[in-house]
Image (cartoon, rainbow, N blue to C red):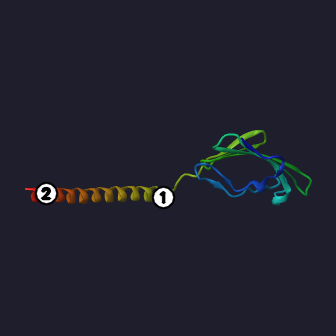
Amino acid sequence: MDSTATEQVLVNFPLRFANGHTIDTLVFWCVKCGKLAQDTQVFGQISRIVPHAADVRASYQCSCGHPNAYRIRLKDNKSFTWLADDVWREQLPPKPSIVTGLRRQYYRTFWSFKMKWVCFLMKRYLKRLHCSIQSHSK
């Protein structure tokens, strides 16, 4: 379990997960006036109890006087959940576009065809080599 004491939250970034997903930073703002918080104004904890998630508990006292509290769970599949108005909300990972899907399918087809072609050429070469060895051994 990796957990930090209450400190400036953003000194713990970037967060890296075992699958390679990296979160470079987070942005916090006042829910009352919308003012962005400076990195040095946000204090809290980041806990890594399970390897595929990081829990962020943070607070920020805005210059307008409104106290802001944040609870966020960042996940290695690029999704995250957060607590807002005592309700947990979820943002799912972005779905790949149609162009991305077509590009992936093209590359799979291309590499499959290329591997079949290489195997065909290799089989033909080995067959010729085998025939050559047999003819020399007679």
> Where does the C terminus fall, quadrant-wise?
bottom left
Q: Which of the 4 image quarters holds residue 124? A: bottom left
Q: Which of the 4 image quarters holds residue 134? A: bottom left
* Res. 41 visible in picture: yes
The residue under label 1 is 100
Left or right placement of residue 21 versus residue 100 in this view: right
Count residues near mark 1 (Cα–Cα under 10 Å), then give few for <14, some for 14-19, many for 20+. Answer: few
* Res. 35 visible in picture: no
Q: Position of residue 45 (x, y in %)?
A: 79, 47
Q: Which disc is residue 131 wearing?
A: 2
Q: Earlier in the sequence, mark 1 or mark 2?
A: 1
Residue placed at 66% from the left, 40% from the top? 50
| Type of amino acid under label 2 | Cys
| Type of amino acid under label 1 | Thr
Q: Position of residue 105 (x, y in %)?
A: 41, 55
Count residues near mark 2 (Cα–Cα under 10 Å), then give few for <14, some for 14-19, many for 20+. Answer: few
